[in-house]
Image (spheres, rainbow, N blue to C red):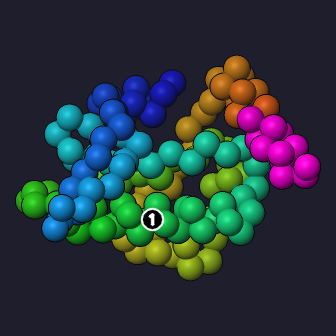
Amino acid sequence: ATLSAELGVPLTPTRLPLGEGITVAVDGVDPSGQTLVEVYARVGVLRSSQLDKVAKDILKLSLLSASQTVSVRPRIIMAFASEEALGSVRGWRRFTADTLGIELRVVELTPETRAAVEAAQSAQMMVGVA
């Protein structure tokens, strides 16, 4: 099932305001703006630069949560494509997400989607080798 189906709300990529004319892109936002989702589509263990991207997403989501002018704090989720990727988020990154109330979870991929993600990752590694 998709994350949208699991949550029972449609999720749409959206640009949200931070303030002072600044906006940021979010992978998925429900129509009420009460659920914000970032997706990290990587199968396998994350490397240092990939963990830096996760840390930036944690910062972005926490800033969005703090800047929202609503009475109820939005639900914030970072979804990962594999248990290995999620398990890579340790130490201060995990502590920060936990402290800020950001849910870290795995979304099950269909075998076809998993194969496509793995093929894309292999292609990226081949480009890096050349």
Q: Main secondary structure of the magenta part?
A: helix
Residue that lies at the very extreme toward the bottom in this rendered image? 92
Residue that lies at the very extreme toward the right in this rendered image? 130
Secondary structure category for the residue under label 1: helix
Q: Nearer the viewer, residue 21 or 122?
A: 21
For the point 76% across and 27% down, which residue is it?
115
Left or right relative to 65: residue 54: right
| Residue 88 locus on image (x, y percent) | 69, 62
Quadrant housing residue 10: top left
Q: Against 99, is 68 above or below? A: above
For the point 29% across and 30% down, which residue is it?
9
Q: What count of labels does the image hold?
A: 1
Residue segment shown in magenta: 120-130
Identify residue for label 1: 58
Number of other residues with Cα within 10 Å of mark 1, as a class: few under 14, some 14 to 19, many 20 or more: many
The reply to whether the magenta stretch includes residue 129 is yes
The reply to whether the magenta stretch includes residue 119 is no
| Residue 128 seen in the current view | yes
Q: Against 100, is 130 above or below? A: above
| Residue 91 locus on image (x, y percent) | 62, 77
For the point 71% across and 69% down, which residue is it?
48
Q: Nearer the viewer, residue 105 or 19?
A: 19
Amino acid under label 1? Ile
Q: Against 18, is 116 above or below? A: above
